[in-house]
Amino acid sequence: MTLIVNLSRREFLAGATLTGVALTLGCHVESNGVRAADSTAPVLAPNAFVTIRPDGRILVTVNKTEMGQGVRTSLPMLVAEELDADWSQVTVETASFDPSRYGFQGTGGSGSLRGAWEPLRRTGATARAMLVEAAARRWNVPADACRTEAGFVLHPSDATKKLSYGELVADAANLPVPDPKAVKLKDPKDFKLIGRRVPRYDNPDIVTGKAVYGMDVRLPGMRFATMVHPPVFGGKVRQVEDTEAKRVPGVEQVFVTDRGVAVVATNTWAAFEGAKKLRITWDDGPHAKLSSADIRAMFIEKSTSPGDVARQDGDFDKAFASAAKQLEAVYEVPYLHHATLEPQNCTARVSAEGCEIWAPTQFPNFVMDEARRITGLDAGRIKIHVTLLGGGFGRRIEADYAADAVEVARRLNGVPVQVTWTREEDMQHGWYRPASLHVVKAGLAENGQPVAVLHRLVAPSIRGQRQPDGGKGVDPGAMAGITTTAYELPNFRAEYVRANTAVPIGFWRAVFDSQNAFVQESWMDELAHAAKADPVEFRLVRLGKAPRLKRVLEVAAKAAGWGQPLPRGRARGVASHFSFGAFCAQVAEVSVEDDLPRVHRIVCAMDVGTVVNPSQVEAQIEGSIAFALSAALYGAITVEQGRVVQSNFNDYPLLRMAEMPRVEVHLIPSSESPSGAGEPALPPVAPAVCNALFALTGKRIRKLPIELDT
Amino acid sequence: MPTTVTINGTKQTCDAPPEMPLLWVLRDVLGLTGTKYGCGAGLCGACTVHLDGVAVRSCTLPLSRVEGKRVTTIEGLSPDGTHPVQQAWKLEDVAQCGYCQPGQMMAAAALLAAKPKPTEEDIASALAGNLCRCGTYQRIRAAVQRAATLQKGEKRS
């Protein structure tokens, strides 16, 4: 339910002399059932303010973090649409952390727009209703006879009369707030902003270098610091020799924290140089021998026993045992790093009176938890500003970098400090996308059609890792896309085998959908091949109960020229997937050059419901494809001697411009509520590419990253 | 010993160790935070600036090597955000998180200064060292082409 309160009086009392009267509305929204990155995480419940000033300017406060997905454009668009605001009058601010005003401020799971869709439109519509009421009273005409347009209320009969929103603010602020449920929302056919290619609000600041990311926070007298964390998972500092480090010009302090060794300096480079010169003796703890080979062996060992049943249709065992032919395969994917281009960092100032934090974070609530734990201060004395993020992708859900900043700041007694990790520290102290191993089986009839299908996932549990006992039973987040498969498969069973390790794991763009779809859609391709069926047709006949997924598959296939001849040396592959509320299908066109896979073109059809901003949905699709290709072609975090092997972009390469395929996007027109868009275009990429490589070379890729020569 | 450098058209005296990379001089000494730290090893291009008009990686360039030279950063690319590259970046709605874009734009501006009519290969080659984790490459390609067109128009007028 939505409750909108008039905050104008409070605003008036607090800031009358500075801002004059302003009409400020807040919407407090209870749970709307939006799924977070993992279906068991807390629900996302958005909340924001709109403030209209007497000069006509409209300030929209966004309660979600901007990390490139465009929330500082798309969420204000929802308010502005129903308010009939002049978009050029809209200014945007990111909310500081205050759940009592803004509700749940965590950003993830492609949930921001989904959650904001109705409440923010109601906020805009409610404000509009109050402005219209104020105008109607002045003119002594019925309110419902008045129209609004681009920041004005228009007189019902006299075309020469119109009142700007700014002129009406003082009157409107004294009106009671109408029941938001009674406020009428626009008919979608009357949308003026929604559906338009509105450029990103932050573009002017970004192209001039003015945009402020976490690392760009500058405060008078601030210090710059870095951290050296234990190289082995779960390790601790035993002893530090810092004589050489302290000789580096600019280095002021070196001290040990709960999380590692801090070097505080007058600039970041001095801190980095000082850190290099530390001689630290570590207590490596119990994981000093952990290796990727051991982890893989453990996965394989666990994969031989049945797991916990997550879904069961019919009787797999019986149908498999009596099938004319039996197929089995094992698929594997590695740990992956987020590699946000802005390394982890955070700025803080802590004194006995209070704590102020400038955090590039997706989840400021976790930053608050850390700040309270470290400082012992009440939440009321801790202020958290959320900066722009130089990439999030799930990495900045965690708050470890904020813990570093607060811990270092606490020892500097009121002197602000920015803690920046080196790229190497960032890469070796991540919360990695879980590795996994999948056993898939199918029983086939004489005609090659599947009569029984098994998908057993062996993987660590993100949620489980954070519970003292590692958690028990099926982790529904880990089974994303497997239990929820849209295909009608006879005698289908999905199993989960928990395989926790000491490697820290976390949410990553499309997390488990990213790997489960790779396996599921590659396996569907294998089954189509076994049935001597066309891969698109084979899927379509099994999507009778999923018309929206079927539709995107048809659209992508047609647009890509599926079945049409290609130049020699090229082939196509297809994959589709439903995740984060969106339906996505892709056709990849590949070749092999110098024994390496080359992706030339990806045609993507997607149904995201109502498209709020086509430019941003397309951007998210392009971005998801690039992100997925980096993983499919190169991505692997490996572990030796209990530590991450990779350290920088030389050994953890990302896709470069020349490798970016031509991306063609086809968005399905729809009047359904918007789905997520930041993640659902990622899962189909790897299987579409691998299926295309199979069509080209006959080699089935069952392990990522892709290796053609093994 | 102070080092004299011309930064965005203004002669500056930097009191910083000669071995300090230009990136950190810009960011932490001069407060020009538009130039970004990404890798510290010349691998990602986020720190790209112009040194006497040529695109260079400031994270591995010691201050001593820029003595007496002209440095241009994203803040100095134009006085008012109207360099053809800046306009094109806005028109093509390139940025996602935007963190790498100052480096991408400085690389693009250097390319266009040297080659006013770049081919697809020229663009891919000039920007090969600039990583974008958000995957804006397709739009960057379009924006460089559009900037080339805008630049041509400016020269005519």
Image (cartoon, coloured by chain):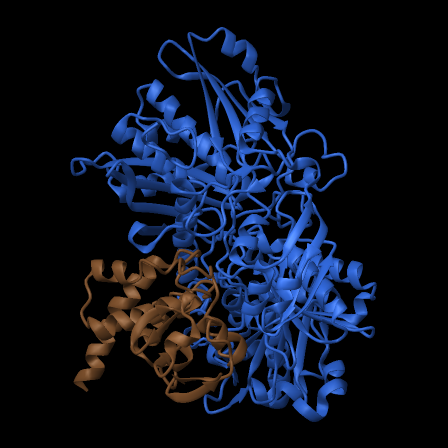
Q: In this view, does A151 lie to the left or right of A32?
A: left
Drawn side of residue A125 relative to residue A671, left or right: right
Which residue sits at x=76%, y=68%?
Answer: A411
State left or right for residue B114 relative to residue A230.
Answer: left
**Quadrant housing the N terminus of chain A:** bottom right
Q: Quadrant of the C terminus of chain A?
A: top left
Q: Is A200 or A205 nearer to us in this picture?
A: A205
Image quadrant assignment for residue A396? bottom right
Coordinates of residue A674 in the picture (x, y in percent): 51, 54
Residue displayed at 36% across by 66% down = B104
Q: Where is residue A290 in the image (x, y as percent from the top left)?
A: 61, 34
**Residue B101 against residue B51 in the figure, above or below:** above
Residue B54: in sight, yes or no?
yes
Chain B drawing hue:
brown
Q: Which residue is drawn at 71% across and 74% down?
A: A177
Q: As rendered, which of A560 and A633 lies closer to the eye?
A: A633
- Chain for colour blue: A
Q: Where is residue A45 in the image (x, y as percent from the top left)?
A: 66, 57
Location of residue A386 with respect to A567 vertically, above or below:
below
**Residue A288 in which image quadrant:** top right
Q: Which quadrant of the view contains residue A593?
A: top left
Query: What percent of the width, then of the height, locates residue A32?
Result: 66, 53
Can you see residue A44?
A: no
